[in-house]
């Protein structure tokens, strides 16, 4: 297989990943669906991580009400940045929804929602924002409002690593540049888009949770570090005792992580004993090992991250390195990465 072919296949894999990161059903359900409009009574609202959904009762041709699910692939914090909040919608009121229909069920990936009071909510779709659909409506949400919040005064907080961080550049942007083996690319065909651990909301193994965009919370606990990744609420223990050995640990989906301070602004984490078969819809090797390096900026507002993956099954050179960064956010817990099977 040529390098060009492998690169194109890698791009195909990547084209599905960001959708999964925000709404893991969207790539399968809506990619080939038709654009349509429905209207009905808003029956209930689900406004929580990582899914936002409205449930609309629509009069069916057979008589009676038929429930439609209205989804969006952005999470509540990012919607709130654009002024889109749960209180814009009122259960019991009529709404009109325009978007792309699911090919699997009565569900729409919404672009525009018109409320009974005349407010048109323009929603992001795959990172873009739709145009206004209904003239004369009171518009909420537009392309220039979907921005990250202003950084906090991290230097004044003076908590160093131990805070909530939010990805500034997605590490998954580097996936097309990885030099994959023919075997790894071929294993992409084994992935079942409709029946897999993501669709079943099963806890994911490393390294995927590290690489998904979202929040990271670093905390201290009993002499160790806790790294909490927002992707499916992945909580990792990083053991800081240099005398501990991976040989004494059983393999698991998160492996055994051992950390050390290279200096006061550099944290190094080595992870071995990983028992997890998947790397972004491909197989990964049984001997995969990870090395993470986190570097804190002088003003404590930015955390540069470097992930080195050692896996001869995945990579032609047996090793690959991905770089990205986090911006400081308010001290406290990260976004809850709740997953819901539906």
Image (cartoon, rainbow, N blue to C red):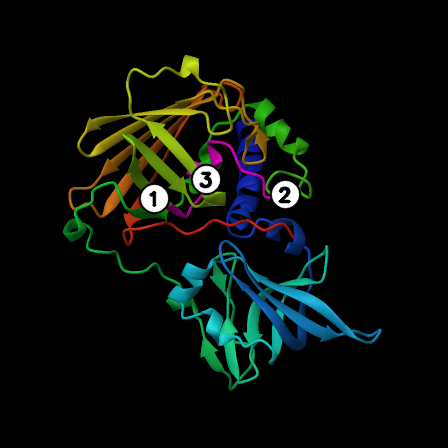
Check if residue 42 falls in the magenta segment.
Answer: no
Q: Position of residue 303 (x, y in %)?
A: 27, 41
**Numbered circles on residues, count:** 3
163 or 147: nearer the eye? Answer: 163
In the picture as drawn, the residue positioned furthest to the front comes out as: 222
Alpha-carbon span between mark 3 and mark 1: 11 Å
Q: Tell me the SS state at disc 1.
A: strand
Q: Which residue appears at 27% of the width and 51% of the height?
A: 331
Alpha-carbon span between mark 3 and mark 2: 16 Å
- Please tell me how crowded label 1 is: few (under 14), some (14-19), or many (20+) other residues with Cα within 10 Å: many
Residue 1: quarter of image = top right
Disc 1: which residue:
217
The magenta stretch is 199-215
Alpha-carbon span between mark 1 and mark 2: 25 Å
Q: Earlier in the sequence, mark 3 or mark 1?
A: 1
Q: Earlier in the sequence, mark 3 or mark 2?
A: 2
Q: Tell me the SS state at disc 2.
A: loop
Q: Which residue appears at 51% of the width and 87% of the height?
A: 136
Residue 71: quarter of image = bottom right
* Left or right of 255 in this view: 182: right
* Left or right of 154 in this view: 75: right
Disc 3: which residue:
234
The circle drawn on residue 200 is: 2
């Amino acid at each position: 297989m040529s390098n060009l072919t492998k690169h194109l296949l890698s791009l195909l894999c990547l084209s599905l990943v960001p959708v999964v990161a925000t709404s893991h059903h969207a790539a399968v359900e809506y990619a080939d669906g038709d654009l349509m409009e429905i209207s009905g009574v808003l029956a209930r609202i689900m406004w929580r991580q990582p899914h936002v959904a409205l449930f609309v009762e629509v009069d069916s041709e057979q008589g009676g009400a038929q429930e439609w699910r209205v989804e969006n692939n952005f999470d509540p914090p990012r919607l709130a940045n654009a002024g889109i909040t749960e209180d814009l919608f009122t259960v019991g009121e009529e709404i009109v929804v325009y978007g792309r229909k699911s090919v699997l069920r009565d569900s729409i990936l919404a672009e525009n929602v018109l409320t009974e009071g005349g407010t048109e909510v323009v929603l992001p779709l795959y990172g873009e924002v739709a145009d206004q659909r209904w003239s004369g409506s009171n518009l909420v949400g537009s392309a220039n409002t979907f921005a990250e919040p202003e950084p906090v005064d991290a230097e004044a907080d003076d908590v160093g690593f131990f805070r909530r961080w939010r990805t500034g550049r997605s590490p998954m942007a580097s996936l097309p540049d990885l030099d994959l083996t023919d075997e790894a690319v071929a294993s992409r065909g084994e992935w079942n888009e409709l029946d897999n651990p993501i669709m079943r909301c099963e806890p994911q193994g490393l390294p995927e949770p590290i690489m998904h965009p979202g929040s990271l919370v670093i905390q201290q606990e009993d002499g160790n570090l806790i790294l909490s990744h927002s992707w499916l609420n992945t909580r990792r223990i990083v053991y800081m005792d240099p005398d501990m050995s991976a040989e004494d640990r059983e393999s698991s989906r998160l492996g055994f992580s051992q950390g050390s301070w290279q200096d006061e602004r550099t944290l190094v984490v080595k992870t071995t004993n990983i028992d997890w078969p998947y790397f972004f819809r491909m197989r990964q090797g049984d001997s995969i090992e990870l090395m993470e390096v986190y570097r804190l900026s002088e003003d404590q507002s930015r955390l540069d991250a470097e992930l080195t993956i050692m896996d001869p099954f995945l990579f032609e050179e047996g090793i690959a390195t991905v770089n990205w960064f986090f911006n400081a956010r308010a001290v406290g817990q990260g976004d809850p990465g709740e997953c819901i099977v539906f």
